[in-house]
Image (cartoon, coloured by chain):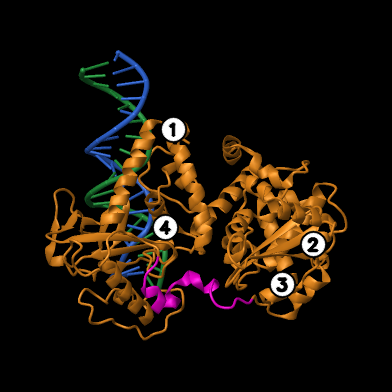
Chain colours: A orange, B green, C blue
DNA sequence: GTTACTCAGCGGGGAGGACG
DNA sequence: CGTCCTCCCCGCTGAGTAAC
């Protein structure tokens, strides 16, 4: 069966529908995907360039556009198992060394801390969470008037426009102050940027925008020391897990295993609440402190010897980077806006790097963009075991041709006995980069948060110059994901150092980097 | 001005790893 | 066990830089 995967070949008549229903992990090659692929290929054939925001075919095959599931329809959150979620947070902390260090004492010395979290929820909030599945109206119904509540606690901010809403769970030493402050002073909001504020700013101007605050939970008194700050953090974390407002990779870790994540893409808590107050401990300016660091200070934290500080910086960086792969285009736009500013600054400052770094970076980018825009004709090579591939730089792509189909053309070349090439046959590789994760990606193992999930590799192995029938390639490799993340970074103008500092990046052929 | 060296990208294999 | 393909290594290029 495995050998049949690519059978819908250049003639295209026989789609070779596989009857066995395979388990879901082999995402590809059900009939619908094949039809979708065919429609997409038709579409691409007529258009130049390698960047597409979306395909017309997406409308006919909405199920193939995987990211949209969470963003369309009438979203309802399944009933959250409060106690399980609390358990999961506490045991998650035990697994993260730095968090264990920070929260260890608090957890050890407070009896039944999981029950405590549930008790801190307001009665109205608990009623909603316990009643069953949750709608947006239920959340609004929690009420609690946090804007006139001078206690400490955790609130939920609902930002709503027609057909879409976003959620942010936040904490405040004084609820009313925080909300008044944010309400009354958009100028201050602009000054201390966060995703929450950015989104707020973007939506504020739109028609029928609504901004609603409700109270999720309160604590007995103002946090007087760091341990009480931490328990407020836990409550915020609890709220963010219940309502799934963390970024999806965080939810995957912090929620009970296998719990369905429905709302992740509406959440604005990209920074982990557990880190609240970390940098600003002792300062009353919780909100501002994070943003006061200069680039150099931040970079020092990121590479410094202090492990806790390093983990914090990594969290901040990942929070920001997660926007680039966000399923919601509005969120992506926020990342790109900031990224362009960084690029402009980078080109002038050279960031302490040699000129050579930038010229080589520019060259490789130029090459990559040419590859993306025009595709590339490559030699077909046959590996030791008979499979065919073609490569661009360090990125080699499995052509998925039936084994030994070109055997009559295979020639041994100059040196070794394993040195094969296919005489007279070229492959034309054409990368396609889209804005949102696609089922046609070359690396099915790429997560939606991997840039590689947006990369499609098409190949013409028929005529070999791009005029022949195009097929889409894929491979079930795992390492290829990290590699192609690099390639997409290259396409999108992210320089080598930045790219390699991100999660799930790997580039081979890099000698002499171990000196760092 | 010439030479030597460095660094990242490029192009190409071979070997070993993963998976049934 | 066979099959398949990723991974890693090597040498090359071309620009920048430092030393002579």
Image depth: mark 1 or mark 3 in front: 3
Q: Residue at x 45, y 77 (%)?
A: A63
Protein chain holding label 3 = A
Does residue B7 appear to the left or right of A286 in the view shown? left
**Residue A476, image x and y in percent?**
39, 66
Are discs 2 and 4 located on one and the same chain?
yes
Q: Mark 1 points at which residue?
A: A353
Q: Mark 4 points at which residue?
A: A479
Residue A478 in view (yes/no): no
Residue A364 in view (yes/no): yes
**Residue A438, image x and y in percent?**
41, 68
Q: Reading the chain from its start, which is encountered first: label 3 or label 4?
A: 3
Mark carried by residue A139: 3
Disc 3 is placed on an element classified as helix
- Where does the magenta region start and end? A54-76
Disc 1 versus disc 3: distance between alpha carbons? Answer: 50 Å
Q: Reading the chain from its start, which is encountered first: label 2 or label 3?
A: 3
**Residue A111, image x and y in percent?**
85, 61
Residue A251 occupies which quadrant of the picture?
Answer: bottom right
Residue lying furthest bottom in this view?
A: A19
Q: Mark 2 points at which residue?
A: A146
Check whether the beta carbons of the residues at disc 3 and disc 4 lie within 8 A of each other. Answer: no
Disc 1 versus disc 2: distance between alpha carbons? Answer: 49 Å
Disc 2 is placed on an element classified as helix
Residue neighbourhood size for the residue with mark 2, other residues' Cα within 10 Å, grouped as few (<14), some (14–19), many (≥20): many
């Amino acid at each position: 069966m495995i050998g049949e995967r690519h059978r819908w070949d250049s003639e295209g008549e026989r789609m070779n529908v596989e009857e066995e229903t395979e388990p879901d992990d082999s995402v590809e090659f059900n009939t619908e995907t094949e039809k979708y692929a065919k429609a997409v290929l038709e579409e691409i054939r007529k258009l130049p360039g390698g960047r597409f925001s979306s395909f017309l075919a997406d409308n006919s095959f909405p199920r193939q556009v995987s990211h949209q599931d969470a963003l369309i329809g009438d979203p309802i959150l399944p009933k959250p198992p409060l106690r399980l979620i609390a358990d999961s947070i506490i045991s998650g902390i035990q697994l993260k060394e730095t968090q264990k260090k920070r929260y260890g004492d608090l957890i050890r010395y407070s009896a039944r801390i999981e029950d405590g979290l549930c008790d801190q929820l307001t009665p109205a909030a608990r009623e909603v969470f316990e009643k069953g599945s949750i709608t947006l109206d239920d959340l609004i119904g929690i009420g609690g008037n946090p804007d006139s509540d001078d206690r400490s606690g955790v609130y939920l901010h609902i930002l709503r426009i027609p057909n879409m809403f976003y959620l942010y769970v936040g904490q405040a030493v004084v609820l009313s102050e925080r909300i008044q402050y944010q309400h009354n002073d958009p100028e201050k909001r602009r000054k201390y940027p966060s995703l929450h504020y950015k989104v707020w700013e973007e939506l504020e101007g739109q028609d029928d925008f609504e901004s609603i605050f409700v109270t999720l939970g309160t604590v007995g008194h103002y946090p007087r020391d760091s341990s009480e700050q931490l328990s407020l953090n836990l409550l915020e974390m609890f709220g963010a897990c219940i309502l799934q407002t963390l970024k999806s990779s965080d939810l995957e870790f912090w929620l009970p295993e296998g719990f369905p994540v429905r709302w992740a893409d509406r959440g604005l808590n990209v920074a982990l609440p557990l880190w609240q107050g970390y940098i600003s401990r002792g300062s009353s300016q919780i909100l501002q402190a994070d943003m006061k660091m200069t680039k150099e200070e931040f970079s020092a934290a990121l590479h410094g010897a202090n492990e806790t500080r390093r983990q914090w910086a990594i969290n901040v960086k990942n929070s920001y980077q997660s926007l680039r792969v966000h399923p919601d285009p509005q969120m992506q736009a926020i990342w790109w806006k900031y990224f362009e500013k960084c690029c402009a600054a980078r080109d002038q400052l050279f960031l302490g790097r040699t000129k050579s770094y930038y010229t080589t970076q520019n060259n490789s980018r130029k090459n990559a963009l040419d590859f993306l825009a025009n595709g590339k004709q490559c030699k077909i090579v046959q590996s030791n075991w008979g499979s065919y591939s073609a490569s661009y730089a360090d990125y080699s792509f499995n052509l998925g041709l039936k084994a030994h189909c070109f055997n009559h053309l295979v020639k041994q070349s100059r040196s070794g006995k394993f040195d094969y090439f296919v005489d007279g046959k070229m492959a034309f590789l054409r990368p396609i980069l889209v804005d949102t994760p696609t089922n046609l990606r070359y690396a099915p193992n790429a997560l939606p948060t991997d840039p590689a999930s947006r990369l499609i590799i098409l190949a013409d192995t028929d005529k070999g110059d791009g005029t022949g029938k195009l097929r889409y390639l894929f491979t079930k490799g795992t390492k290829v994901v990290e590699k192609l993340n690099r390639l997409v970074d290259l396409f999108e103008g992210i320089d080598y150092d930045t790219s390699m500092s991100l999660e799930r990046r790997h580039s081979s052929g890099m000698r002499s980097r171990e000196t760092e």
